[in-house]
Image: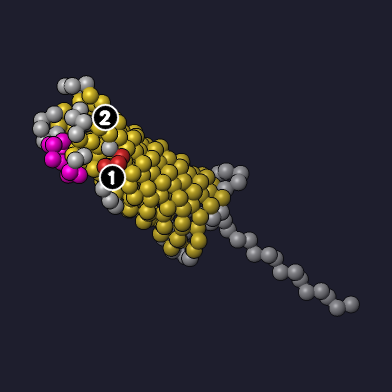
Amino acid sequence: MPAKAPIAPVPVVAPYNWTGIYVAGAVGYQWAKVHDIAPGSGFITDSTVRSGLVSGIIGAQYQFNILPMGGLVLGAEVAANHAVRNNSSDNFGFCANPAFKCGLRRLDNLTTVGGRLGWAYDRWLLTVSGGWARAEFERTDYLIATGVFGGGGGNSNFAHNGSYVGGGLEYMIYSDKLTDIMVGVDYQHLWLRSRNDVDANGVIHTLDATDDIVRGRLTVKLNPWR
């Protein structure tokens, strides 16, 4: 009887590994709630900020294959976000002088530094994150009758520190021996702490804000150690 040819074993494909250093570009949108108290008069102005964002991100992470379904990923990430346009006066609140509206012309130069914890399932990565945040509050006034910004001397520009938490989902769309490319989406909620900002008239404004950010991101990761 002729012998049957041996059946070739099916090659085992190793699951994708998320270890490496990476850079990313992102575009997104922020919506913030701003609380402004003038302690000298007790007047309170609540306003909002709406703006698109562009972001640059750099990070590093390591995957531990210790979970029954996938791996545990630990990492750190730094992001710089820039507002692409000024906030509309429609988002301002009224000043103590009702002829003016007051608010933030820009909530800008927003920086976050924090850690990431993720669950990797082959080409998918689900993460939570958190850490330190900082942003510049560019306050101004708006004369309703003329549409002129800053005419009442309400301008100030101070940086506020705070913190953030977030989450994200990424998918690897390309991989070779050194380079990987991922697409993803993430969300961050920021608390920007209260501090006293002094405007051009010498008036103190105690400002704080909460900010929500949603971004789509494209990431390039290098892993020369695998």
Q: Find residue 102 and report its horizontal and vertical position in percent.
A: 23, 35
Q: Residue furthest front?
A: 145
**Predominant SS along the magenta part:** loop
Q: What residue sits 50% from the left and 58% below the top?
A: 172
Please give the residue where the numbered disc 2 appears in the rendered image.
Answer: 45
The answer to whether any part of residue 65 appears in the image is: no
Q: Quadrant of residue 93?
A: top left
Q: Residue furthest left?
A: 201
Near-viewer residue (43 or 67): 43
Q: Find residue 133 and report its horizontal and vertical position in percent.
A: 31, 39
The first of marks 1 and 2 along the sequence is 2
Q: Find residue 42 and report its horizontal and vertical position in percent.
A: 22, 21
Q: What residue sits 33% from the left and 50% below the top?
A: 53
Q: Quadrant of residue 2?
A: bottom right
Q: What residue sits 49% from the left and 63% below the top?
A: 174
The N terminus lies in which quarter of the figure?
bottom right
* Whole-number angstrom distance, CA of label 1 to CA of label 2: 16 Å
Task: Specify few, some or many for label 1: CA neighbours under 10 Å numbering under 14, 14-19, or 20 or more.
Answer: some
Image-based side of 153 in relation to 43, left or right = left
- Secondary-structure class at tag 2: strand
Please give the residue where the numbered disc 1 appears in the rendered image.
Answer: 88
Q: Find residue 101 and report its horizontal and vertical position in percent.
A: 23, 36
Which residue range is magenta in the image? 146-157
Residue kind at label 1, given as amino acid type: Ser
- Secondary-structure class at tag 1: loop
